[in-house]
Image (cartoon, helix red, strand yellow):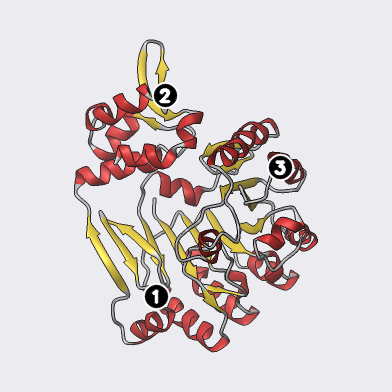
Amino acid sequence: MTSLYIHIPFCVKKCIYCDFYSIGYEKALARAYIKAISKQIKLLDTNFHTIYIGGGTPTSLDGPLLCELLKALRGISKKCNEFTIEANPESLSQEKIKLLRGSGVNRISIGVQSLNNNKLNALGRVHNLGRAVESIYLAIKNGFSNINIDLIFGVWDETAANWQNELMAAVKLPVKHISCYSLTYERHTQLFKKAKSKVITPLPDSAAARMYKITMKYLPKNNFLQYEISNFAKRGFECKHNLNYWENNPYIGLGASAASYMNGVREKNISNVKEYVERIRKDKSVVFSAEKLSVKKSALETAAIKIRTKEGIDFNWFKKKTGFDFKILEEDALNLLTKEKLLKYNTKGNQRTGVRATEKGFLFCDYVCARLL
């Protein structure tokens, strides 16, 4: 199963914590960019299992440009199972929602980030709580039943009680999926600079870990089942696009900074919109870097990615997908991580059938993934 990702790098405002490639919205540049992306879409001859338009803020595009992009996708979007677009509340009008739904988009991911106005202000978000909630109900009113909201926890002056209140409010909303991310201080962001200059003091890891533990307990009790480190969904509403990533299946990425993984080759596009547009215009490659993975490295990557899921890794599935026996390939890491109680075996009778992360393993996921690699 192959997925298609399209990166729309334009934003109304750059968030202080954002490390994704994005730039301010310029209408002329956005028009040239969508023209370039549309040209690439016409050359695609693959049937896609899922389509995901991310950013940036895809809904920062004006109506005509958004319509142009969706028209270019019409031929392939009819055949896919899931078609997602990311949106921010401030740029999600009724007209755009109707356009999205009428163009085959069947899942919308709204960057709410917080259900607390003080926290939204601290994070530098353009919208307020009222606008965030309004955008969700507007999507429902206009035909969307599969809605995700993104939430951030672990902000520098946040308490566990504050976060608990947000989760209580979140489960009352008419959404099917909630993604919860711990605030990270990525280099080259405004947030990192503020922390470095001591304008703000990051929460201790123990406080953020406590909030994550609350999340893992509270959301499943309210019918949002955890199926990956940061993702919780009502049964049957897990994000198919992300599941495709976590099974290390192939995908094509269009747009500046987008990545692709096809036929064992991992590629990354250039991270410059103007240069991207110019290269497409001249029919030149937009690939910045490429790596052909060995069969073994691909298997190790599959292990490191799939362990992020709640179900973990089934040994038979892994053997069928990679050709490797997981217990042999990852013997040293498996012994260490189970001893440290970061991984535990799935069993059927007396048979070990697979392995998955413990609650502690989810808390130290980066370490677990690094060991498996």
1 or 3: tag closer to the N-terminus:
1
Identified by mark 3, the residue type is Leu
Q: Secondary structure at mark 3?
A: helix
Identified by mark 1, the residue type is Gln
Q: Nearer the viewer, residue 19 or 188?
A: 188
Q: Could you say where residue 364 lies in the image, as x and y percent from the top left?
A: 45, 37
Q: Which mark is residue 40?
A: 1
Q: Could you say where residue 373 lies in the image, as x and y percent from the top left?
A: 29, 42
Q: Residue at x 57, y 65 (%)?
A: 16
Q: Nearer the viewer, residue 344 or 99?
A: 344
**What's the CA distance linking mark 1 and mark 3?**
41 Å
Q: Nearer the viewer, mark 1 or mark 2?
A: 2
Q: Nearer the viewer, mark 2 or mark 3?
A: 2
Q: Say whether marks 1 and 2 touch (CB < 8 Å).
A: no
Q: Is residue 158 left or right of residue 57?
A: right
Q: Is residue 102 left or right of residue 315?
A: right
Circle 2 residue? 341
Q: Residue at x 42, y 45 (%)?
A: 246
**What's the CA distance linking mark 2 and mark 3?**
28 Å
Q: Secondary structure at mark 2?
A: loop
Circle 3 residue? 167
1 or 2: tag closer to the N-terminus:
1
The mark tally for this picture is 3
Q: Is residue 11 above or below residue 88?
A: below
